[in-house]
Image (spheres, rainbow, N blue to C red):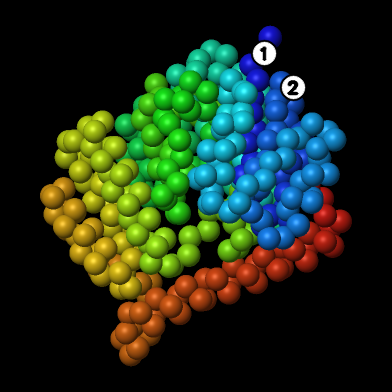
Amino acid sequence: MKPLVSILIPAYNAAPWIADTIRSAQAQTWARKEIIVVDDGSKDGTVAVARQFEAAGVKIVTQPNQGAAAARNHLFSLAQGDFIQWLDADDLLSPDKITRQMQAAASGGPQLLYSCGWGFFSHRPQKAKFVPSRLWEDLTPLEWLLRKWEHNLFMQTGTWLTSRELSERAGQWDARLQGDDDGEYFFRVIKASGGVRFVPDARVYYRMSGAGRLSYISRSDKKMEAQFLGMKIQIAYLRSVADDARVRAACVTYLQNWLLNFYPNRMDLVAEAQKLAGELGGQLQPPALSWKYRWLQKFFGWPAARAAQINYNEWKAAVLRAWDRLMFRLEGGRIV
């Protein structure tokens, strides 16, 4: 009998998207699958939409709002699968995504972790752009983690197919972390694995739907503190694997790239990051704004220039999403 794959969908205020996400899970050509949705206390109609799929065998569970990591831990406790497919409630899988990765797993085994390509989209998945990075290769755990930080890269959560064995070895999602909890979790999974195998023909469509995303990071003090905690944890993980000059330099690069998230509102965290960089043999520089905002910085200060940058980027993203939504409707709402 072929292995069972559990497709696990944590959801929070995902009413506009959850139906398409569940359909993409149902459309998987891998026959032995179970689909479970845990709603994390949504305030919109997410549960009502999801329950329309119960008759087709999709399991729907609700819980009070506890955060993304707690929802994922609940999902895993319910899963019966030999392999785990995480799927955010607004993203989509290509129909053969799991089949192709399971074909790779037939020869690679449960010790390997399976990834694939992914592309951003808003409303029209057929317009998603798949841009390969230096993570889109077969890599050892250490090389994968180093490249991620050296080049400021990431893999979208849905790209991974993980064996139950690896999932249990990595442990639960860390509910203390309110941002990049998936980065910290898969850091542990990768560290526990025998390597990452990239499956080029499998695909994930990563929806950029705005602030309602499960993984959205606000700029609250609590979330900044949780973010920095996750960074320190991951640095400790990497140094437990190796602690040579390249590893320490990658850690400093990681701190530098993420410094913008804390500067200048949390200078205490900036100082702690600088101290940690010093212990690693490096030094952090104040985060630089792009040339478009330097004139604002000169006349109004760094905080005002940074706020202008954030507001402009959010406005631009909203306009692009609105345009894509209009084109989606004009094209008849086709989903690949």
Q: Position of residue 332 (x, y in %)?
A: 86, 56
Q: Nearer the viewer, residue 161 or 220?
A: 220
Which kind of residue does numbered mark 2 sit on?
Answer: Ala
Residue tagged by mark 1?
Answer: 2
Whether 79 is drawn above or below 124: the answer is: above
Query: Helix, strand, or loop for circle 1?
Result: loop
Q: Position of residue 169 (x, y in %)?
A: 42, 25
Residue 201 in view of the camera:
no
Question: How many neighbours does mark 1 have within 10 angstroms: few (below 14), some (14-19), or many (20 or more)?
Answer: few
Whether 63 is drawn above or below 195: the answer is: below
Residue for point 61% across, 31% down: 78
Residue tagged by mark 2?
Answer: 31
Disc 2 or 1, which lies upstream in sequence?
Answer: 1
Residue for point 23% across, 51% down: 252
Contact between marks 2 and 1 (CB within 8 A): the answer is yes
Which kind of residue does numbered mark 1 sit on?
Answer: Lys
Res. 84 mark: none
